[in-house]
Amino acid sequence: MGRAYQNRKDSMAKTSDMKAKLYSRFGREIYVSAKAGGTDPAGNLTLRSLMDKAKREQVPAHVIEKAIAKAEGGGGEDFAPARYEGYGPGGCMAIIEALTDNPTRTFGDVRQAFVKSKSKIGTPGTVAHMFDHCAIFVFPHDDEDAVLEALLEADVDVTDVENEEGKLTVFAPNTEYFKAKTALNEMGIEEFEVDEIQFVPQSYTQISDEDRPMFEKFLAILDDNDDVQQVYHNVEL
């Protein structure tokens, strides 16, 4: 399961258009987090984690600062989270997360991604039960037992801990994110290669060569949509 967080990154090329999309996505997430929970990262753990993640993804400092300044000024757009799911090309399962100021528009755009790739959007719960909603932390460490003990002492419901080549991957239910992050910070662990909540498929599927172009089209349409923040699927890449 430890490879799951890598799937999406491995499927994206480093082009300027995709960098712009990345900056826009982080800018919107940081703005929403700062507006909802305050602009001080010390008191807003979600914001701090987003800022750390943005820096790891090499998002320029001015993009982060602009989003926080916008939140400090009040006003601005009112974005709300939205989640869509369904069956994509080749019968794969997909979950799409968005931040939108116009749910009707975003639903229509996401639905078109399914329609244009000859797929079918579903209702809430259509495929979500086939994914685990996980908090995932990846960081350099060589003492799996010490980390597990600290998490259990903090009453974190740890799902799994994997140790591979000096890196630990900790999985916990999404509801345990803040508790787990705090416990790891208290151990002195501050730098994470992965620090996020995501949907991890319980099983993977392979799609045929005939379905792959349509699958790539499906992802490309969603990636071009500014409202779409994350796309999760169960295709083995």
Image (tube, rainbow, N blue to C red):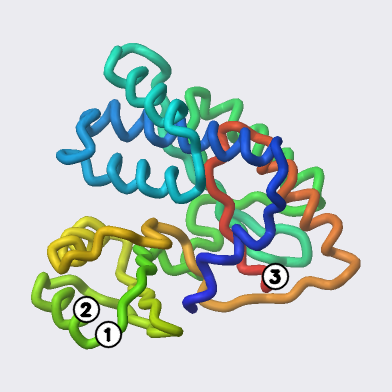
Q: Mark 2 points at which residue?
A: 147
In which quadrant of the rendered view does residue 76 lie? top left
Vertical arrangement, residue 215 with respect to residue 57, above or below: below
The amino acid at mark 2 is: Val
The amino acid at mark 3 is: Leu
Task: Tell me the element at label 1.
Answer: helix
Closest to the observer, 50 or 201: 50
Task: Tell me the element at label 2.
Answer: helix
Residue at figure coordinates x 37%, y 26% from the top left: 65
Vertical arrangement, residue 5 with respect to residue 105, above or below: below
Residue at figure coordinates x 40%, y 25% from the top left: 67
Q: Which of marks 1 and 3 is nearer the N terminus?
A: 1
Mark linked to residue 144: 1
Is 151 left, or right, of 98 in this rendering? left
Is 44 left, or right, of 133 in this rendering? left
Q: Position of residue 125 (x, y in %)?
A: 49, 58
Residue at figure coordinates x 38%, y 34% from the top left: 30
Q: Where is residue 204 in the image (x, y as percent from the top left)?
A: 62, 76
Is 180 left, or right, of 195 in this rendering? left
Task: Tell me the element at label 3.
Answer: loop
